[in-house]
Each structure stands twice: as structure tokens, then as C-alpha cells.
Image (cartoon, rainbow, N blue to C red):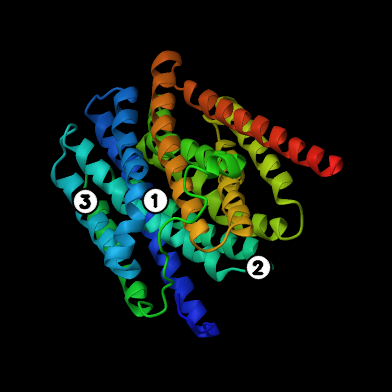
């Protein structure tokens, strides 16, 4: 990290680089998951196998976490993040050039590794430049940009279709442009060393609710991105509507995160975390009743905004509690939970759809939200009891 304090202009430039980097992560997932799912659906692949193939990106996220600190030390933060951006662009084109179900497994595995480098370092970086007075709003802005990038990916599908090269070419070009702000801040980037004294595994004891929040968001995100288009197709809504359902879900993320961040700066963040989990469960339970009609659009927007809010609030609380290299370890633990959630979400959702029909997907998502709420209420109750006892 630079020894002197950053000027306001340098802070804005750093924020632009952070947002550009995390947008590559979000845009790559937002485009690749639904478009590849639709390609496989057109090939007659089962929902379970589509979910398994999609989960390989999350496997890459999961297994890459221990390698990120040494790679960052060896290459430097900016050089490593630039390498990840190049890999994302190349792999996106490779997936279109080699439309082979079996070859997509290793390609999506490496893609998960590349996006995870951007994920961990961007999220550590944003918490380093935030302070306790503006942390919720700044991370709300950060997650808003992340959500907008998620939404931009699926929006290419109804415009150009899933069988065209055009979405892949546009995606690779947009990803490549994100390298420019990183080059501009190469002398301002902080220096994150090895994982801190707490270590990655210690966070499962230190912050289980926050890690569960990361897991839940990844679970819902991966299942929805890969299987919500299939859900729409099996309700016979058409490819364009199926793609727009994902976009509506993520659009809710775009418009809700800054207001949720503002609320988090003015009320108990753990309480708001539980409220978001409850709304996530309610939205999933309402989807079978409303998913085939016009009310699906406001439902998906509100459901998406409040469910993704679980992640933004968990990240805010992580930055509130930890600093420096311990924050790197915490974000690496978040990445592990994102990887696990991203693996289990498509697998559970796809298996439920194969067993129970399309409505198996929202039932699995509602159950995941319920488990998170139970854990969060239990942990918050224990914390309150300890405070009163002391």
C-alpha cells in the first residue's frame, strides 16, 4: 500500500479500477452461465448435467483460493489482475469456439480460477479504502456496479440469441477494456501479503454468519444464472423471456444495493441481514405462483435485490471487523464459500428440477434462505445473550 494518503482524485481512480475489476468477474459469470445453459438445453442435455457443467466455474473458484496470496506476491497485484482479465476474455471466446460439452468442464474450471483472482483482490481493496462512516454506502456502490455487470451479460441473450458469436465477441471486448483503469493505478494499488494471523480456516469460527451469507448468495446466484433460463423455457415462456428473467433478478441487485448500504450505515447490520434473508425465502416461495404471469417482473426485481443484499451486508460487516492481511484471509474464506455455494446451487437446483419439475428450483432456493435465517438468528441471539451476561 502507498505510504502516503491518497488524494481524492487518486481515491476515485482507485475506485474505478476496483469497479472495473469486479465487473469483469460479474459480467463473465452473468453472460457465460445463462448463455452456455441455453446452448446445452438446445443440445438436449439434462438440467442436472447442465448444473454440473456450470458448477465447474465454482470449482475453479474454490480450489484457487489457497494459490492467490503466493501468486499475488510473485506477480504483483496489478500484473496478476491483468493476467486474470486476459484469461477471462480468451476463455470466453474459447467456450464459443469449442462447443463441446466435455471440453467445457476444464475450460470453465480455469475460468473460475481467473475470476476468483479479481474477486478476492477487488473485495479486499474496496474495504481497505472504505472507513466505518461510509463503508455501507461505498460497498453498496461497489455491489451496485457488480450487479450492473451481472445484468449486462444476460441482456445480450435476447438481443443476439444464444447461438451467435456476437455476445461472445462483445463480452471479450468489454472484458479487455477493464484493463485500462488497472494500468492507470498500478502505482497506487495496495500491497496485500500472505493471509493474516487468523488464517482462512479460522474464519469459519470467527464469522460463520458472514461466510454463510457469502455461501447463500453464491448458491442462489449460480442456480439462478444457470437454471432460471431453463426454468423459463420449461414453463414455455420462450428464450427471450427466459433470458430477461435473469436480467430482472440481477436488475433488482443494481437498484437495491446503495439504499441497503445506506440503511446499513444507520441501523443494526445483522438485523438487516436477517430481514434480507427472510425476503429471499419469501420471493422464492412466491415464484411458482407468479413466475408465469406479468407479476414475475416486480417479484424478480425485489427478490433479486434483497437476496443479493445478503452478500453486500456480509462483506460490509467483514470489513468492519477485520483489517489488513486478516481481511485478505477473510475475503479468501468468502471465495471458498462462494465456490462451495456455486457448486451446490446448480447441482441442487438441477437435481430438484429433474425430480420435481421446474418448481423444484424455487423450492431449493427457499430452503437455502431458510437455513441461513435460522443460523443468523441463532448466532445473533447468542451474541445478545453473551452481552447481557457480561
The crowding category of the residue bearing disc 3, from other C-alpha atoms within 10 Å (few below 14, some 14 to 19, many at least 20), is some
* Secondary structure state at the residue bearing disc 2: loop
Q: Nearer the viewer, residue 378 or 36?
A: 378
Q: CA distance from mark 2 to mark 1?
A: 31 Å
Tell me the residue at 23%/56% (across/down).
87
Q: Is residue 351 above or below residue 172?
A: above
> Pointer 1: what residue?
155
The residue under the point 32% across, 57% down is 70
Between 220 and 354, the residue placed more toward the observer is: 220
Q: Earlier in the sequence, mark 3 or mark 2?
A: 3
| Residue at numbered disc 2 | 134
Write down the residue under mark 3.
91
Quadrant in the picture for residue 16: bottom left
Q: Real-space Cα distance between discs 1 and 3?
A: 20 Å
**Residue 202 percent location from the top left of the image:** 52, 44
**Crowd rating for badge 1 (residues with CA inside 10 Å; few <14, some 14–19, many 20+):** many
Q: Quadrant of residue 222?
A: top left
Residue 156 visible in the picture: no
Circles 2, 1 touching at the beta carbon (< 8 Å)? no
Say the numbered circle drawn on residue 96.
none
What secondary structure is found at the residue carrying circle 3?
helix
Instruction: Identify the residue at horizontal 53%, vertical 58% (top origin).
Output: 144
Asked whether the beta carbons under mark 3 and mark 2 sit within 8 Å of each other, the answer is no
Residue 166 rendering spot, x and y as whole percentages: 23, 54
Amino acid at each position: 500500500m502507498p505510504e502516503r494518503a491518497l488524494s481524492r482524485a487518486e481515491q476515485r481512480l482507485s475506485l474505478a479500477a476496483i469497479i472495473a475489476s469486479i465487473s469483469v468477474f460479474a459480467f463473465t459469470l452473468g453472460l457465460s452461465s445463462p448463455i452456455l445453459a441455453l446452448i446445452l438445453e438446445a443440445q438436449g442435455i439434462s438440467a442436472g448435467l447442465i448444473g454440473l457443467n456450470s458448477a465447474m466455474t465454482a470449482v475453479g473458484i474454490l480450489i484457487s483460493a489457497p494459490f492467490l496470496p503466493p501468486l499475488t506476491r510473485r506477480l504483483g497485484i496489478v500484473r496478476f489482475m491483468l493476467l486474470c482479465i486476459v484469461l477471462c476474455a480468451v476463455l470466453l471466446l474459447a467456450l464459443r469456439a469449442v462447443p463441446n460439452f466435455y471440453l467445457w468442464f476444464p475450460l470453465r474450471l480455469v475460468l473460475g480460477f481467473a475470476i476468483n483472482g479479481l474477486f478476492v483482490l477487488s473485495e479486499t481493496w474496496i474495504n481497505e479504502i472504505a472507513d466505518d462512516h461510509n463503508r455501507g454506502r461505498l460497498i453498496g456502490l461497489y455491489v451496485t456496479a457488480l450487479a450492473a455487470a451481472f445484468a449486462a451479460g444476460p441482456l445480450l441473450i435476447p438481443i443476439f440469441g444464444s447461438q451467435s458469436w456476437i455476445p461472445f465477441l462483445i463480452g471479450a471486448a468489454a472484458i479487455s477494456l477493464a484493463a485500462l483503469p488497472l494500468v492507470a493505478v498500478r502505482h497506487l494499488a495496495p500491497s496485500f501479503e500472505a493471509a493474516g494471523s487468523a488464517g482462512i480456516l479460522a474464519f469459519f469460527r470467527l464469522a460463520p454468519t458472514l461466510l454463510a451469507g457469502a455461501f447463500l448468495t453464491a448458491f442462489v446466484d449460480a442456480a439462478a444464472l444457470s437454471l432460471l433460463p431453463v426454468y423459463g423455457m420449461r414453463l414455455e415462456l420462450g428464450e427471450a423471456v427466459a433470458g430477461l428473467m435473469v436480467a430482472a433478478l440481477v436488475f433488482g441487485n443494481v437498484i437495491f444495493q446503495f439504499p441497503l448500504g445506506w440503511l446499513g450505515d444507520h441501523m443494526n447490520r445483522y438485523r438487516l441481514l436477517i430481514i434480507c434473508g427472510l425476503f429471499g425465502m419469501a420471493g422464492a416461495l412466491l415464484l411458482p405462483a407468479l413466475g408465469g404471469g406479468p407479476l414475475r417482473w416486480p417479484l424478480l426485481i425485489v427478490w433479486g435485490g434483497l437476496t443479493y443484499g445478503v452478500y453486500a451486508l456480509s462483506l460490509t460487516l467483514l470489513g468492519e471487523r477485520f483489517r489488513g492481511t486478516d481481511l485478505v484471509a477473510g475475503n479468501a474464506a468468502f471465495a471458498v464459500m462462494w465456490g462451495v455455494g456455486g457448486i451446490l446451487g446448480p447441482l441442487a437446483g438441477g437435481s430438484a428440477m429433474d425430480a420435481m419439475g421446474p418448481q423444484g428450483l424455487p423450492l431449493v432456493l427457499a430452503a437455502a434462505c431458510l437455513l441461513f435465517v435460522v443460523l443468523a438468528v441463532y448466532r445473533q441471539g447468542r451474541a445478545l445473550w453473551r452481552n447481557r451476561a457480561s
